[in-house]
Image (cartoon, rainbow, N blue to C red):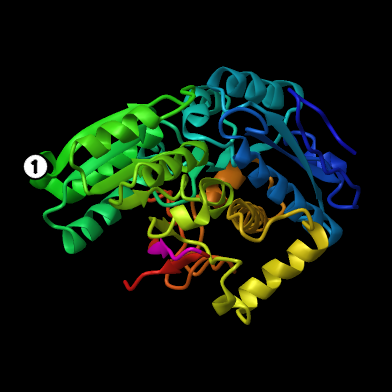
């Protein structure tokens, strides 16, 4: 069964006996056979590649439903295409909450869309579990927005990691910055500034931004080259990182090129730019690479590949949005199972904020711990640096 909203939606709805309906009459979005979960995602627009995250999550929920659902209920997953446009995100979320009456929101994708919806979501006291953004703004004031909870490491933390790497490997480097002019890009710049400290103003020779509506960033790349920068620090999304890699190669500029984890996707960004042009790109990761033969015998990778084969045959093993969506859906299932038979909104958000630090997710890199407390709501707090060798990203020594 499929529900359509704003151009794209996915619904998984199946029946299974559970608690008596009388026990669930006052629980919004929950019946004796299902739990409604809502999401906004960009199936269109400048970040449409991230729509595949939602598809991966839908495919994972199909597997869960085939296995009997969660707490005796199947997942009814309703997804609205917001085109990565904040006004459309607000419209879509209102529809999900007021018309579809979902129990919770899950993985609403994008920094700007999440910034736009969170006041409304919190005023309605609807849990928004595992926001699809690493922006630090979503954890700086958890008391003001108690119903919104992110998952991945913060962009600011990631920026600090890059600063540490630059200081260790190119302490006299001249840094040229290109960032997306929104909270995503500004967070990465803030993280770099945190890490460089009083060296930031001395090392940064050019600091430029772009808008997601810009047709090209060629001018910015040319200005960065002309500045004399030998470190290219980029905070972008895949469409623009592909442009930057291609232009950098075309003008024969060879800086140390650092691209944030959002932009440095092998597919579509690096492949679109040209794998040979992408050699040496540095980024950060927290998930295993499904194309790396070193993980072939890893139990978590085997579990992931078995899911892909049966439930996501359309998935591309080289596109990291698939293991990301798989992992986020898996993490939500952990929360819902922990909530037990009390699937009230209050108990679900409480479960998300009390995730045991013994929690493991099969595709997360070894050594990266997961857990939450009411005082520390972001589950994942570290990453690993990696460098592209022409075929795949190789983890760098810690």
Residue 101 lies left or right of residue 156; in this view the side is right
Q: Secondary structure at mark 1?
A: helix
Question: Crowding near pointer 1: few (<14 within 10 Å), some, many (20+)?
Answer: few
**Residue 295 at what x, y percent from top left?**
57, 76
User: Left or right of 265: which side holds 41?
Assistant: right
Residue shown at 33%/73% (left/top)? Answer: 397
Q: Is residue 188 left or right of residue 365?
A: left
Q: Nearer the viewer, residue 299 or 225?
A: 225
Residue 266's place in the image compared with 288, above or below, is above
Q: Quadrant of the C terminus?
A: bottom left
> Which x, y percent locates residue 129?
57, 43
70 or 177, which lies in front? 177
Q: Is residue 106 visible?
A: no
Please, is residue 331 above or below residue 106 in the view? below
Considering the whole magenta stretch, tell me its main secondary structure: strand
Residue identified by numbered label 1: 202
- The answer to if 388 sits in the magenta stretch is yes
Question: Which residue: 61% across, 46% down?
Answer: 348
Residue 48: % across, % down:
62, 35
Q: Residue at x 68, y 56 (%)?
A: 316
Question: Residue 45 in the image: x percent, y percent?
Answer: 61, 27
- Residue range highlighted in magenta: 385-390
Q: Is residue 32 magenta?
A: no
């Amino acid at each position: 069964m499929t529900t359509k909203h704003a151009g794209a939606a996915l619904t998984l709805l199946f029946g299974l006996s559970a608690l008596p309906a009388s026990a669930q009459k006052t629980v919004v979005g929950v019946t004796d056979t299902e739990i409604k979960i809502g999401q906004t995602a960009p199936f269109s627009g400048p970040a449409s590649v991230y729509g595949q995250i939602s598809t991966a999550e839908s495919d994972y929920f199909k597997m869960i439903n085939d296995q009997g659902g969660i707490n005796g209920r199947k997942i009814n997953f309703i997804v609205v295409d917001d085109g990565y446009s904040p006004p459309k995100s607000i419209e879509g979320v209102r529809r999900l909450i007021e018309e579809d009456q979902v129990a919770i929101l899950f993985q609403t994708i994008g920094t700007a869309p999440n910034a736009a919806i969170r006041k409304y979501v919190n005023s309605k006291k609807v849990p928004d579990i595992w926001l699809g953004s690493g922006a630090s703004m979503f954890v700086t004031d958890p008391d003001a927005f108690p119903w919104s909870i992110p998952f991945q490491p913060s962009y600011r933390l990631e920026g600090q990691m890059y600063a540490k790497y630059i200081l260790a490997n190119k302490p006299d480097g001249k840094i040229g910055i290109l960032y997306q002019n929104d909270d995503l890009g500004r967070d990465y710049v803030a993280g770099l500034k945190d890490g460089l400290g009083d060296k930031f103003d001395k090392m940064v020779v050019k600091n430029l931004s772009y808008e997601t509506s810009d047709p090209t960033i060629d001018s910015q790349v040319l200005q960065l080259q002309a500045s004399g920068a030998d470190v290219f620090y980029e905070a972008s999304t895949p469409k623009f990182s592909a442009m930057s890699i291609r232009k950098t190669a075309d003008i024969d500029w060879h800086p140390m090129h650092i691209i944030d984890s959002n932009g440095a996707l092998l597919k579509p960004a690096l492949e679109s730019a040209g794998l040979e042009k992408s050699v040496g790109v540095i980024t950060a990761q927290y998930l295993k690479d499904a194309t790396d033969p070193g993980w072939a015998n890893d139990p978590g990778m085997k579990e992931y590949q078995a899911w892909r084969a049966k439930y996501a045959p359309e998935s591309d093993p080289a596109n990291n949005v698939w293991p990301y969506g798989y992992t986020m859906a898996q993490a939500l299932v952990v929360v819902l199972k922990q909530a037990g038979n009390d699937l009230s909104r209050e108990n679900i958000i409480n479960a998300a904020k009390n995730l045991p630090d013994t929690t493991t997710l099969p595709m997360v890199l070894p050594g990266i711990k997961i857990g939450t407390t009411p005082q520390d709501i972001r589950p994942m707090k570290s990453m690993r640096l990696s460098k592209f060798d022409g075929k795949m990203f190789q983890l760098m020594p810690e």
